[in-house]
Image (tube, rainbow, N blue to C red):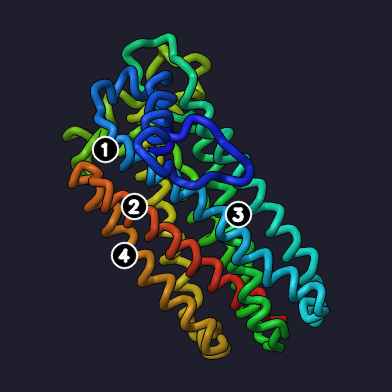
Amino acid sequence: SGLSMVDWKLQGRPLPRNEEEWALEFEKYKQFPEYKRINMGMTLDEFKEIYFLEWAHRMWGRGLGLVYGLPCFYFIVSGKAKAIPGMVPKLIALLGLGAAQGLVGWWMVKSGLTEDPNVYKDPRVSPYRLAAHLTAALCLYSGLVWTGLTALNPNRMLIPNIAVRRMRSVGLLSVLFTGITFFSGAFVAGNDAGHAYNDWPKYAGKWIPDELWDSSLEPGWRNVFENTATVQFDHRNFAYTTALVVLGVIGTAKSPTVWKDLPKHGRLSFYALGAALATQVSLGICTLMMFVPVSLGATHQAGALVLWTTALYSQHALRYIR
């Protein structure tokens, strides 16, 4: 769907209103590689389906700008945002990051509209730009979550327990590894690497895939980001590492010297983190072994966001202890 709209306008556009306008958009699409190499023979009705998904995605993003921007303007002008130190620049920065996300998205789409000299390669957006677009979205989302939690709980609590304060550094590990695994998932999507191997825990019956290193990819580091076997292998192992780290963080939090002094919402955050981890691991394995149906793939991505959110929540709970 992402390559069905072959141009971009800052203000957006309405859906085509009649068959003539639809036919014009379809003719534009036919000039680009995705139609020529994959969707040759697609009907107008089939084109409408993929076009609508991309159009809705773009217009939803613009709508979010209004949903966020108008209240943001009110809170800043009325002076209410100043009640929390440092809130105004954060709100403005988040608005700017949201606006930039649209530009990053179009920059990504453009990479899939160019003709690749390799006629056997399916047209798709650059996995590097896809990762950039997803990472920018994650940064924006994280800023919104963190700022929202701060607005709900602006005052730090005083807990003299040194072990609790040390949990901040330990808790950062869960955020770090969850973020790395999330980022690697963008390359799985960008390279369609979920289809490289669909057995688990092995790779086509082997613990180390035969295609792990493609010597024809120069320079060699490109294997990490473009070789489907390597990309899936890395993502799985990042996930295993993240699971172990998160379990270690939860175990540390549950130690008697820490747990007894954690605030109620701090304890809740670690329960949520454990539940999100178990769900996401299960989703990842099911998605892989069922050959990555779109519904499960999207659910797995949503699960990653839930896990990331709970990691942020737990870290915020620790951050606001002094």
| Residue positioned 19% across, 41% down in the render | 199
Camera-near label (1 vs 2) is 1
Q: Is residue 94 found left or right of 265 in the rendered image?
A: right
For badge 2, the amino acid type reads Ala
Q: Are marks 4 and 3 in contact (CB under 8 Å)?
A: no
Mark seen at residue 285: none
Camera-near label (4 vs 2) is 2
| Residue positioned 63% across, 42% down in the render | 10
Gap in angstroms between the C-alphas marked 3 and 1: 36 Å
Question: Label 4: which residue?
Answer: 279
Gap in angstroms between the C-alphas marked 4 and 1: 37 Å
Secondary structure at numbered mark 2: helix
Of callouts 4 and 3, the N-terminal one: 3
Question: Label 2: which residue?
Answer: 298
Secondary structure at numbered mark 1: helix
Above or below residue 124? Residue 186 is: below
Camera-near label (3 vs 1) is 1
- Determine crowd level at label 1: few under 14, some 14-19, many 20+ residues with C-alpha closer than 10 A: few
Of callouts 4 and 2, the N-terminal one: 4
Mark seen at residue 45: 1
Secondary structure at numbered mark 3: helix
